[in-house]
Structure formats: structure tokens, C-alpha cells
Amino acid sequence: MKKIIVIFLILTAVSYSQELNCKVTVNMDNLTNASRDLLSDFGNTISDYLNKTRFTSQDWQGEKINCSLTILFLTGTTDFNYSAQVIVSSQRPVYRSEKNTLMLSINDPMWVFSYQKGQGLFLSQNSFNPLTSFLDYYAYMIIGFDIESDYEFGGTPFFNKAINIVNLATTSSSTKGWVRTSGSYSRQALVEDLLNDKYRPFRQAFYQYYYGIDIFPINPKVGQQKIVYLINTIYSMRDKIDFLSILIKTFFDARSGEIVDYLKGYPDSNIYTILKRIDPSHTAKYDAALNLAP
């Protein structure tokens, strides 16, 4: 598991200056040959930025976070303006296991930015840039979720950095994809929900969930109890939150399959009925698991 500096770990943990090990894949099938030529170095430039930038103020303890960005260009113009759809994912190892657990799986439908071949990219906390601020936002979200799985509310400093980027974006001339809109994904909606007090019980249960994932190889019964605790916590919040909120949807999009996997053999099949109520998008998975339940 990855850790930000903790005194008693300093002497034993491997540390890195950078936090991310990010694989960047670029698809330009929708672009003209002229636009592709203008973007010939784009993938390497983005990869270098994410993997060589230090996003935290302290050395990163433990392995770098494995993550990926799949960038599908939608449009491009001769004046260096582009739009793209981006799939963001990250994972971390399960403690005492050869398995990994998926932390984020986000399909961001609209990234609008300008880029010129050979352009230098630089981290800035105080100004908004449609290109680098997008990358910074997801770097902070990836790091925040990773730490949140190890320490209760541990991701808050990084979610705060992400919301600062959102605030800069929403007052800029490039708000597409950033502002909260009804019924669709937005970067603002995801991080605002994370920092909203009404989702605090979810974040506490999120930490317990990952305790369950990590303890499962040693004690499956306790592991399942922790996973069920999160499910029941979300269900108990039903009068305060929207089960279709970006935060809850993002959580289940990444973990619905994993939850079914870890709950195999769980004695109370009613858990799948609850899952269908709080995560209707993955009803088919839960119905299939329900049919196989003991």
C-alpha cells in the first residue's frame, strides 16, 4: 500500500520524488493527417508530465501508483485547438495478495484544450490552464483516492487541491466538462460530493471497505463484513443522497465486479437486493450473483 510520509515508516519505506506511474495511450483515428502530425509528440509529452511532476510536497512512500489515461481525440483544428474523451483509471495492490484493486475508473467525455508541438508543460497552483489543469486535477484525484484507502479522510488535502482547480476553471473562459450539470459527469460534481459533509459517512465506510479488501486474504469473514458495512452505510444514507450522484456512480463503476467477487459465499443473499437499490446501473451483475448465492 502507498503511504504519504509517516514517521515510523520513514526508515523502512522506499521513497520516490514522483507519485505516479502512468501509462498514456492516444487514439487519433478521428483526426486528419495534418492534425495527427501536429500531435506527434503529444502522448510522450503528457506521459512525461504526469510521471515526472511531483504533485505532493513530501517524498512518496512505497510504490508509485499505477494508473492510465486513454485519450481519444474527437476534434482538432489547424489553430491547435482540440477536444478529447479521456478514460482515467488507477489501481493499487491488495495487501498480502498478488491481486490489485481498481481505485478509479472514469470516462470523462469532454476535455477541451490547446496544444502546440514542443510545448512545455508546467505545474501551477494559482492559474488555470485547460491542458495542464486537467492533468493536475486527475493526478490529485488519483493520489487522494489512493491515500483515502489507507487512512480515514487521508485524501482530503488532495481533494482540496482538486477543488481549487475546479474553482479556477469555473471562473475561466473554458468551463466545458468542469461545471456541475444535471445527469452527466462533471469534475466539479465528483470532488464537491467528496468534500460535502453529507457524504462523510460514505468516506468513513470507504476506508473500512479497503480494510476489508486488504484483510480478506487473511480473514475472508472479516473482509466480507467490512464490505457489507459500506453497502449498508450507503443504503442508510438513502434519504440524504442521490444514488445516481457522480461520487456513488464512480465508486460502483470501479468496484461492482470486485464486490460481487468478494461476496461469493456470503450467507445473506439480501445483500444483493440492497446493492440493486443503491447501484441500479449494475443490476444485471447483482441478479447473476443472486442466482448463484447459497
Image: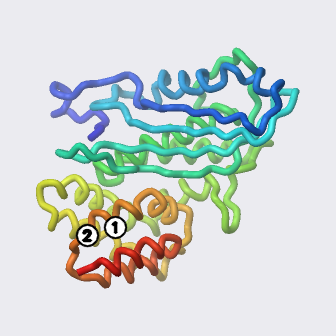
Mark 1, residues whose alpha carbon is within 10 Å: few (<14), some, or many (≥20)?
A: some
Mark 2, residues whose alpha carbon is within 10 Å: few (<14), some, or many (≥20)?
A: some
Q: Quadrant of the C terminus?
A: bottom left
Q: Residue at x 87, y 27 (%)?
A: 79
Q: Is residue 155 left or right of residue 192?
A: left
Q: Residue at x 49, y 40 (%)?
A: 140
The span from disc 1 to disc 2 (Cα, nearest Å) is: 6 Å
Residue 143, label in figure: none
Q: Position of residue 51 (x, y in %)?
A: 48, 25
Q: Quadrant of the N terminus?
A: top left
Q: Quadrant of residue 7?
A: top left
Residue under label 1, please give it: 260
Q: Is residue 253 above or below residue 236?
A: above
Q: Position of residue 188 (x, y in %)?
A: 62, 54
Q: Of all residues shown, which one is farthest toward the top?
A: 118
Q: Of all residues shown, which one is farthest toward the right?
A: 78
Residue under label 2, please give it: 264
Is disc 2 placed on a helix, strand or loop? Answer: loop
Q: Residue at x 48, y 60 (%)?
A: 253
